Amino acid sequence: MIIYKSKDKLELRISGVNRFFILAAAISSFLFAAMHFDFDHVLVYMSMGFVFSFLYVKTYRIAVPITAHALMNCLPLLSLFNS
């Protein structure tokens, strides 16, 4: 049985996300979008960056967001072969 001294630590343990995650993920996703240099699709890239940040925080493995990014890159490639 795990006993927590404060409600905040218990909520952090349950949710797995601390209060600065939103800020850190927003900055990270903005940089992710900026690195793609496609300003017509900034919101798409920012949302993908936010999802990749969330995947890393939930799994603590960098391979998970890297794999998700590789799979996202395969989708346009598959559409080229199907047309």
Image (cartoon, grey):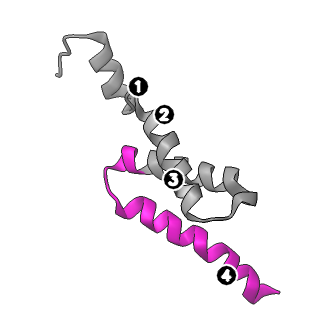
Q: Which residue is mark 3?
A: 31
Identified by mark 4, the residue type is Leu
Describe residue 3's horizontal placement relative to residue 83 as left or right.
left
Marks 1/2: CA–CA distance: 7 Å
Identified by mark 2, the residue type is Ile
Please tell me how crowded label 2 is: few (under 14), some (14-19), or many (20+) other residues with Cα within 10 Å. some
Q: Are marks 3 and 4 in contact (CB under 8 Å)?
A: no
Boundaries of the magenta span: 56-83
Q: Position of residue 17 (x, y in %)?
A: 39, 32
Q: Position of residue 48 (x, y in %)?
A: 58, 54
Identified by mark 3, the residue type is Leu
Dominant secondary-structure state across the stretch colored magenta? helix
Query: Which mark is first along the chain, 2 or 4?
Result: 2
Please tell me how crowded label 4 is: few (under 14), some (14-19), or many (20+) other residues with Cα within 10 Å. few
Q: Nearer the viewer, mark 1 or mark 4?
A: 1
Q: Count the marks: how many?
A: 4
| Residue displayed at 31% across by 50% down | 60
Q: Nearer the viewer, mark 3 or mark 1?
A: 3
| Residue displayed at 52% across by 40% down | 26
Query: Which mark is first along the chain, 4 or 3?
Result: 3
Describe residue 82's horizontal placement relative to residue 2 as left or right.
right
Q: Residue 22 shows which numbered tag?
A: 2
Q: Are marks 1 and 2 in contact (CB under 8 Å)?
A: yes
Q: Which residue is mark 4?
A: 77
Q: Residue furthest right?
A: 83
Secondary structure under tag 1 reads loop
Query: Which mark is first along the chain, 4 or 1?
Result: 1
The answer to which of 26 and 71 lies nearer the viewer is 26
Q: Quadrant of residue 11?
A: top left
Q: Which residue is mark 1?
A: 19
Marks 1/4: CA–CA distance: 37 Å
